[in-house]
Amino acid sequence: MSLKEKINTSKLPQHIAIIMDGNGRWAKQHGEERIFGHENGVKSVRETVETAAEIGIKYLTLYAFSTENWNRPQEEVIALMQLLVYTINAETETLNKNSIRLEAIGDLSSLPEDCYNELQEAIENTKTNSRMTLVLALSYSSRWEIVNAVKKIAQKIENKTLTSSEINEDTISQHLCTSKIPDPELMIRTSGEHRISNFLLWQLAYSELYFTDKFWPDFGKEDLYQAILDYQNRERRFGKTSEQLV
Ligand code: FPP
């Protein structure tokens, strides 16, 4: 039985989030510059998006560029931005063919103008697609997002449109960039690092975490199936006992 056949399609996670890590080390392993790793990472992005949509995942979030990534060498930042612009442009048609809607979270106003425009255009051109939503986290960091949410809530209190006693978990969720997106049930990180790295800190509260040693450019459809199978074999208790779940 193949890995794909073992997946229980009635127990799929609705939302999978991925920290695509290890492009630089993969490039080094191949005796190449870091950008070669990112270019090959795009192949994994394509395969993962296609596979996720094909098996029925409704939301896929990819951590493509963190707030901290701005501190990388200037030539790598520029090359990554160019790669993003090129990829978004080149893939919009495929997204439409597969009815995939593009969304983005993060401090998008800090992106270079061409990248920002390309992104907004692709979001606009795919907005009626309904099979799966692909969310790119770009210039994103969870602490930045939470600080923003707190500011927006404080503003409402100042304007007297909200009182502090009305604040609950939903209030926080509704002021995050992901207000219209369900929390991920599964978070995958490649490259053997076991960290969350400022990614969806609030939203991952009850997510199952899956780590693989593979570098992102080596991650393919079988790896995604494996991660989903691993998720399906876990008992999600949400603080309850196993007996309570029966
Ligand atoms: C992490 O590897 C990867 C990134 C910071 C960038 C990810 C970008 C892509 C896969 C290309 C474009 C993406 C899209 C969505 C079109 P790293 O550089 O931190 O690797 P290292 O830890 O080995 O140095």
Image (cartoon, helix red, strand yellow):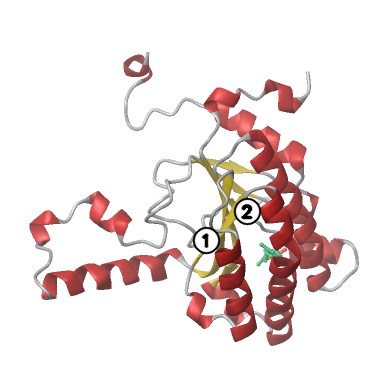
Residue linked to disc 1: 197
Residues at circles 1 and 2 in contact by the CB criterion of under 8 Å: yes
The dot on residue 193 is 2
Q: Percent position (x, y) of residue 36?
A: 83, 69
- 1 vs 2, front mark: 1
Q: Indicate the amino acid at tag 1.
A: Ser
Mark 2: give few (<14), some (14-19) or many (20+) Cα within 10 Å: some
Q: Residue at x 53, y 35 (%)?
A: 13
Q: Which residue is drawn at 72% across and 78% down?
A: 82
The picture quadrant where one finds residue 195 is bottom right
On screen, residue 41 versus residue 107, left or right, reads right
Separation (CA) of disc 1 from disc 2: 10 Å
What is the secondary structure assignment of the residue under circle 2?
loop
Q: Is residue 76 above or below residue 208?
A: below
The picture quadrant where one finds residue 243 is top left
Q: Indicate the amino acid at tag 2.
A: Glu
Q: In this view, does 2 lie above or below 125?
A: above
Q: Percent position (x, y) of residue 32?
A: 88, 70
Q: Residue at x 73, y 55 (%)?
A: 94
Label 2 CB less than 8 angstroms from ligand 1 = yes
Q: Which residue is drawn at 56% across and 80% down?
A: 111
